[in-house]
Structures are given as C-alpha cells and as structure tokens.
Amino acid sequence: MKETRVHLTVIVLALICIGMVMIYSASCVNALQTYHDSLYYLKRHLLFLAIGLLAGFGVMSIDYRQIQPHARLILGISIFLLVLVLIPHIGTESYGARRWFKLGVFHFQPSEFAKLAVIIYIADFLSRKQQMIHNFTRGFLPPILVTGLVCLLTVKQPDLGTTVEMAVVVFGLMLIAGARFLHLAAMAAAAIPVMIYLVAKEPYRMARIIAFLDPWQDSQGIGFQLTQSQIGLGSGGLWGVGLGHSQQKLFYLPAAHTDFILSIIGEETGLLGALAVIVLFVLFIWIGIRLIRQTHEGFGYFLSIGIILMLGLQAMVNVGVSIGAFPTKGLPLPFISYGGSALIFHLVSIALILNVSKTQDQKF
C-alpha cells in the first residue's frame, strides 16, 4: 500500500500548490487595497499550512488506534467548543454568524474540528457495535442522536452547509455499515421538513434558492455572486486569460479566494485548468477508496471512509456551487481555498488516512 499512499500524498501536495498560487492571484488586489500588502492572505495561508503540516506529522507519529479510546472525549471537547462559540463576547460574530474564536491573528472555527470529531466517534461506535446496527434503539439511534446534537449546535451559529455535510457523511457511514434501509429512510423523511423550515425561516437562504433557480433574473441583486462566478468561468474559455489577469477578482466576485476560487482558476487557466483540478479530486477519491479496500481493521476502515466522504462531498459541493449546479453554500474547496481551520483539519484528516494505511502495512 506504500505506492498508493505516495500517490495520495502527491495529489494532495499538487492541490496545495495550486491553492497557494491561486490564493495569491485571487486575493492580491483585495489584500493590497484593504491591508496595503498584496501578500497578506498568502502569508496567512502559508502560516495555516505550516500549522496543518506540523499537526499532520504529529498525527503520523502515533498509532491511529491510540485515538480510538479517546473518541468520546474528542467528541465531548468539540461539543463544548460549539457551545462556547455561541456565547457573546467569547465567540466572534461576523455578518450575523457566530462561528469563530479569535486567537490573536488566528480565527479558529470549531465546526471544522467537530466534523472530524464526529467521524472519529462514529467510526469508533461502528467498529464496536456494527453487529447491532439493525437494532434501532441500541445500534442505530445513539449515533443519530449524537450527530443531531452537533448539527443543532452548528445550525445555531448559523452554518447550514456544515450541518448538511455532517449529516450526509454520517448517513453514508451508517449505510455502508449495514443499517436498515427503513431506518435510514425514516431519518431522511424526518430531515426533509426540518430542512424546509430552516431554509424558509431565513430570508437569505430563500434568496439563495431563488438565485440558484434563475440567477440571471436578478443578476445585480440576489443572483450577483452566482452570475459573476459563471462570467468568470465563461471568460476563461479553453486556455484562460492567463495567471494574474482575472477581471472577476477586481471586486466583482465576492469570496474569490475562498468559496469561489474555482471560478478564478477557470478564468485564468481556462476549462483545461478547471478540469485538471476536478480530475485531481476524482483521483483523490479513487485512490482513497483503494486504501479503504485494503484496510482490515474496523475503526481505521470507517474512519477512512468518513474522511474520504467528507472531503469528496465538500469538493463536489464547491464545484457544483461555482458552476451553478447547487445553491450557494459556504464550503471551501479542500486544500485550495483560503481558510485556516479548514486547511489545518483537512491536513490532519489526510494524515489519519495515511496513518491507517501505514499501520495496516506494519500489521499485515
């Protein structure tokens, strides 16, 4: 499995390198005008990258199975942080959302930690009680209730995108573990009216749905972000306008270096550049599945599945939002978008997958 691990590492490094180049290109004008330093966002991104790599090497230095006995503690810490961030004067509020702790120059987003904590907890639960998964009260309900609590806390921030992402990942893990279809169908049916209510109660969420259905109907209003994203992708043509020559990053496309960085990639490197990024993610998922199929220990197996599901789903949603296939959601493109907490925990997640694979080689 060593060769497969090398392939996965190379793909992640390629995505990270693309991210560094494109974050600078997409943010330099904004950073120069706002902070009088065109390298502002890139320097911060490199700091987060260094922290993530150090954390990843730390995870690689231990046997991943040592994490399993602490799965509930890790989950408990993440829930505590999700509660803490909601308290005024402790959590930092921005644009009506309270999702971050401000620690000097660093903004820590506990929901990114919570996503990984939930996966670790579910992987531990399923590895110990998979044979009970058909029992509703003892095998199915406990992980659903825990996930529901974490989702409730993330919705309160509010962060519906992360909430849906966690729910889908847990649903996938339960399905793979062999949960009854009737139980899963009942859970999905119960979630539908809740989702409708959460969307309907917030005007900005309804606006995103309307913009998704026809962004060009109000291209200067609710459809502005999506239409600007599509203009950027369309302007690139096949070969792109050239690195650094994007027009959309000149304050036309909001979140150009975060949630909509793929639009800048498409504008500057063309359809071929955007497709290259998508192919790298497809290869990432394929190689991840190969590693999972070679994993014979329960905790590592479900842990790896959960991480690949999380990163693959996030990449798919980000690409879908950029091209207008999904309503706008604030999910960054893994390893490429600017974002401290997300990058750090994505690198830790990759380290866990590599750790599982390495330990399997040593064991078998």
Image (cartoon, grey):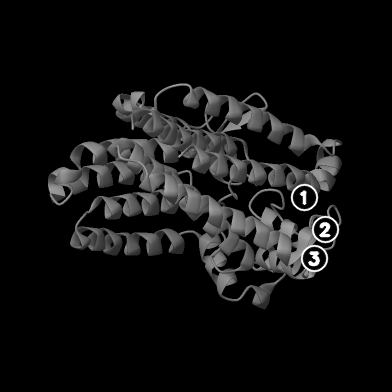
The residue mark sitting in front, 3 or 1, is 3
Tell me what residue is drawn at x 63 percent, y 28 percent. Answer: 106
Marks 3 and 1, the one that precedes in the sequence: 1
Q: Quadrant of the N terminus?
A: top left
Identify the secondary structure beneath mark 3: loop
Residue 219, position as x, y percentages in the image: 70, 72
Could you give the CA–CA distance between mark 2 and mark 3, rounded to whole angstroms? 13 Å
Q: Is residue 329 visible?
A: no
Task: Name the quadrant containing residue 83.
Answer: top left
141, 210: nearer the viewer: 141
Tell me what residue is drawn at x 77 percent, y 50 percent. Answer: 26
Marks 2 and 1, the one that precedes in the sequence: 1
Name the residue beneath numbered marker 3: 239
Name the residue beneath numbered marker 1: 26
Residue 203, position as x, y percentages in the image: 52, 62
Identify the secondary structure beneath mark 1: helix
Q: Are marks 3 and 1 in contact (CB under 8 Å)?
A: no
For the residue marked with disc 2, what is the amino acid? Answer: Ser
Q: Are marks 2 and 1 in contact (CB under 8 Å)?
A: yes
